[in-house]
Image (tube, rainbow, N blue to C red):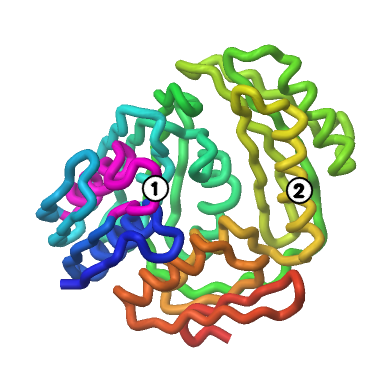
Amino acid sequence: MIVIDGSQGEGGGQVLRTSLSLSMVTSRPFRIEKIRAGRKKPGLMRQHLTCVNAAAEVCGAQAMGNEISSTALEFLPGPVKAGSYRFTIGTAGSATLVFQTVLPALMIAETSSQLTLVGGTHNPFAPPFDFLERVFVPVVERIGPRIELILQHYGFYPAGGGRFQARIHPAPLTPIELLERGSVVSRRGEAFYSLLPEDVAARELKVIGRTMNIGDADLFPRKITHSPGPGNMAAVTIESEHITELFTGFGQKGIPAERVANSVCRQALDYLAAGVPVGIHLADQLLIPLALAGGGRFLTLKPDPHTWTNIDVIQTFLEIAIQVQQKTDRVWEITVGASG
């Protein structure tokens, strides 16, 4: 049995989620200790428990320690079963992270699957649904599977209550390389807001337009009417010849709208200045699909702690080399397997 230190690296829920994903794929059981030990509330929160239970349902696993606040878990996987599943978090915990936990197994299953996920779709601690739809899924589809996403209700933090569906159609996986971004085709600014004054969106879009040199025709206030609670997300989408990236920031009580928009613009400007195709968050999320495909290579910005932690956990389950090399002050290359 593989033993995982849940406090390693960035020490959050990602260690658990990656372990679950790869245990399902490899059929290798694991025990994880010190789950989220460095967090203010250590152990399994509702979102993490949903990931455990979802993974267990998909592969018929035996799980011990799968309860709220548990700091240790044993997971004994069985065979992955394609099918129709519904996973409900019950809080604003990220439904998108539950999706990403079970996706690797279902995208190499024998037949197609359908998921309904209920919980947070837009919160500051996870990829929002729009990132999955515009950035993550299009790149994963180049590797092989076909994935359809449908957002039915927005679920902003802290109310949650969002819902989306995913259909996953497996296919053989093929390594890919993302070494060129190509010319920027378009820049778009958006401000999503639910049960908040329209002025919040207007102030965010003013900053985005000015800072990113985006004209009014490409600035969009998005009033959300099908969300159970208030929420706000500012976003900049950069569409290039070979890839699309999305940068987001979330409104919080006491934080001026201008500050939220400025944080989004800083992320987008750093990405543009580096000239790379893959942003920091996508770099982290591509590692498992590329490892399962047997290889891949991409250029990105300086890897964050999530990426380094993900590499360590992946190499615990899979015998595959992952190399990280700094090319310039701004540009890093990540090579999975023997690609390149």
Foreground of the two, 139 or 324: 324
Picture layout, residue 112 above or below residue 92: below
Residue type for callout 2? Arg
- Return the mark for residue 90: none
Label 2: which residue? 266
Residue 195 visible somewhere in the drawing: yes
Residue occupying image coordinates x 79% and y 52%: 269
**Mark 2 or mark 1, which has the lower sequence index?**
1
Question: Which is in the foreground here, disc 2 or disc 1?
Answer: 1
Relative placement, left or right, of 271 versus 231 is right
User: Hey, what amino acid is under mark 1?
Assistant: Arg
What residue is at 42 percent from the left and 26 percent from the top?
Answer: 160
Residue 219: image x %, image y %? 79, 31
- Residue 32, percent from left and from top: 23, 61
Judged left or right of residue 309, residue 27 is left
Question: Which residue is pictured at 46% across the width and 70% down the height?
Answer: 290
The answer to whether residue 107 shows anywhere in this view is: no
Quadrant of res 271 = bottom right
What's drawn in magenta, residue-wise? 35-59
Q: Secondary structure at mark 2?
A: helix
| Quarter of the figure with residue 5 | bottom left
Placement of 33 over or under 42, stated as above or below: below
Is residue 256 a member of the stretch shown in magenta? no
Q: In percent of the image, x 27 and y 35: which residue is there?
A: 86
**Residue 39 marker:** 1
Q: Is residue 203 above or below residue 51?
A: above
x and y percent of residue 315 in the render? 37, 76
* Residue 267 location (% of width, % of height): 71, 50
Q: Quadrant of the C terminus?
A: bottom right
